[in-house]
Amino acid sequence: MSEKRSAWDIVQIARDPKRITSQYIINNIFTDFLEMHGDKLFADDAAVIGGVGFLEGIPVTVIGQEKGVDLRDKVNRNFGCSNPEGYRKSLRLMRQAEKFHRPVICIVDTQGAFCGIGAEERGVAESIARNLMELSRLKTPVLSLFIGEGGSGGAIALAVADKRVMLENALYSILSPEGFSSILWKDSSRAAEAAELMRMTASEIREMGLIDDVLPEPEGGAQAGDGGAFAGEIKKYLVNSVKELMAEPLETLLGKRYAKLRSFGQDAVVGK
């Protein structure tokens, strides 16, 4: 891993406009990817890319939160902040994966779910809660990869998994440091101070037992250096993990997933 950084430094790296996105992961790791659109209820949410592809010959369902790569793309994708349709599209693809016994790979990268009036009217909280419930009992392996920001319920909706891994400079938190400092001190300018208190970095999250692994990044972050070589490291990890999960009997897999979820309320919160 690279040198020790402050939590605020890591926040800046995770938010770097040049940081790799879900689209990058899909293009460089999976082959023959076929994107699917819509939730069959209301609309297609461009903040979520979902479809079917191959990981070293293994058919998988991939669901990624996408922030976009340039201004036009970011606006189209609502900067990675999903509406209810995004979570319902994700759930539709997860259920399809379960039907055909395909592993599900979720790519987490969002500040949080969209909090607009329309999202509230169409039930964004219910859509997230439904994903949590369904993922907890989905009868196929599930892996979640955090590549950037993992904010609030918007991230949790794709993070109930048999294995969770974060890139070294990814984040996982209840809300943004700016939001945290605004609530705690009524002063958003203390965001850097809040970031240190929130225990939101990959190393801290692993210490609390909320994720399984941390993948080291090149010097300067995943957006720097030889992107192809780093994509290869991510791919190697995903291939090994998916094969490991697929080798587990389904009953054992679901039992371990349930036990892990139950443990979060007991050990993880106090950092054991």
Image (cartoon, rainbow, N blue to C red):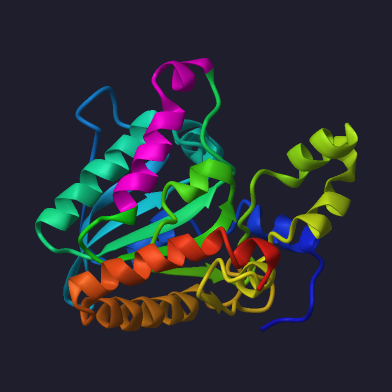
Please say whether residue 55 is visible from this viewpoint.
no
Residue at the front extreme, as displayed:
266
Q: Is residue 129 magenta?
A: yes
Q: Nearer the viewer, residue 8 or 120?
A: 120
* Image location (x, y in percent) of residue 84: 39, 30
Please say whether residue 197 is visible from this viewpoint.
yes
* Image location (x, y in percent) of residue 218: 61, 78
User: For the image shown, how many numbered marks are present on the structure?
Assistant: 0
* Image location (x, y in percent) of residue 83: 43, 30
Q: Residue at x 66, y 43 (%)?
A: 175
Magenta stretch: helix, strand or loop mostly: helix
Left or right for 243, reference 101? right
Q: Quadrant of the N terminus?
A: bottom right
In the image, residue 79 sits, relative to residue 134, either above or below, namely above
Q: Nearer the viewer, residue 174 or 176?
A: 174
Q: Residue at x 34, y 46 (%)?
A: 133
Q: Residue at x 49, y 49 (%)?
A: 156
Q: Residue at x 46, y 61 (%)?
A: 262
In the image, residue 188 sits, relative to residue 215, either above or below, namely above
Q: Nearer the viewer, residue 255 or 143?
A: 255
User: Which corner quadrant of the image does residue 269 belong to?
Assistant: bottom right
Tell me which segment is drawn in magenta: 117-135
Q: Quadrant of the C terminus?
A: bottom right
In the image, residue 204 sits, relative to residue 218, either above or below, namely above
Q: Is residue 1 magenta?
A: no
